[in-house]
Image (cartoon, grey):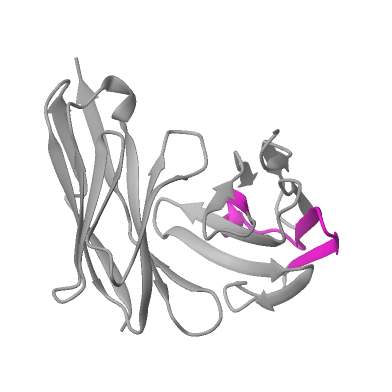
Amino acid sequence: DAGVIQSPRHEVTEMGQEVTLRCKLISGHNSLFWYRQTMMRGLELLIYFNNNVPIDDSGMPEDRFSAKMPNASFSTLKIQPSEPRDSAVYFCASRGSTDTQYFGPGTRLTVL
Amino acid sequence: KNQVEQSPQSLIILEGKNCTLQCNYTVSPFSNLRWYKQDTGRGPVSLTIMTFSENTKSNGRYTATLDADTKQSSLHITASQLSDSASYICVVSLNTGGFKTIFGAGTRLFVKA
């Protein structure tokens, strides 16, 4: 089992550029969560999907952030335009029939 | 206000010693409480999950306790190993019909040889 796969692992970009983060769920899981982690704010839930449908996006900081789940196993988190304060580690987590979330390795985003 | 507070913020112990991490919460309505371990540069990994009716749960050398009356939880690590060096995050979920979680800031544990 490959676990949750995230790409890229590291991203460095300039302010104003579009950033797309990708996540592949564990096979058979039906819930996906996007988190952001910073030293100042810790872990924050951005959005979660259940069966491809966004259930709660109240954690998405602003309209520059958008997330999609085009199929049952894949999701993208897009930031357009990116800003330096978006610099963080972005985690994707997958959940199946149990209550346990399995986190991916994260994408470290640096916006210059 | 729903909050999860963890203490201490950081802790240094010698290999082989025991330690206890604390988590106090003011979350309502309570659904469950999880402890996660996060190694540097990796995503969090679930250690334990407890519902309202459970007051202790073990996972190897990790034992979590929950006192729903005082809204306190602890994570006890027995016979610490160097690989226990990590951040330990307490997460409380609300019973609101959706998925609402409150994260603690974590305790950073350093185990020294």
Residue found at the very far front of the displayed protein: B53
Instruction: State the residue in front, B106 or B99.
Output: B99
In the image, is residue B112 part of the stretch drawn in magenta?
no
Residue A91, compared with residue A8, is above or below; it is below
Residue B40, compared with residue A59, is above or below; it is above
Residue plotted at (28% across, 21% down):
B82
Q: Quadrant of residue A66?
A: bottom right
Residue plotted at (15% across, 44% down):
B20
Instruction: Please give left or right for residue B108 compared with residue A55 in the image.
Output: left
Instruction: State the residue in front, B40 or A81.
Output: B40
What x and y, as percent, mark residue B61? 26, 34
Residue plotted at (61% across, 53% down):
A93
Residue found at the very far top of the displayed protein: B113
Instruction: Please give left or right for residue A112 compared with residue B81 in the image.
Output: right
Residue A103, compared with residue A83, is above or below; it is above
- Does the image show residue A89? no
What x and y, as percent, mark residue B73? 21, 60
Q: Magenta stretch?
A: A66-94
What x and y, as percent, mark residue A1? 69, 33
- Does the image show residue A99? yes
Residue B29, compared with residue B70, is above or below; it is below
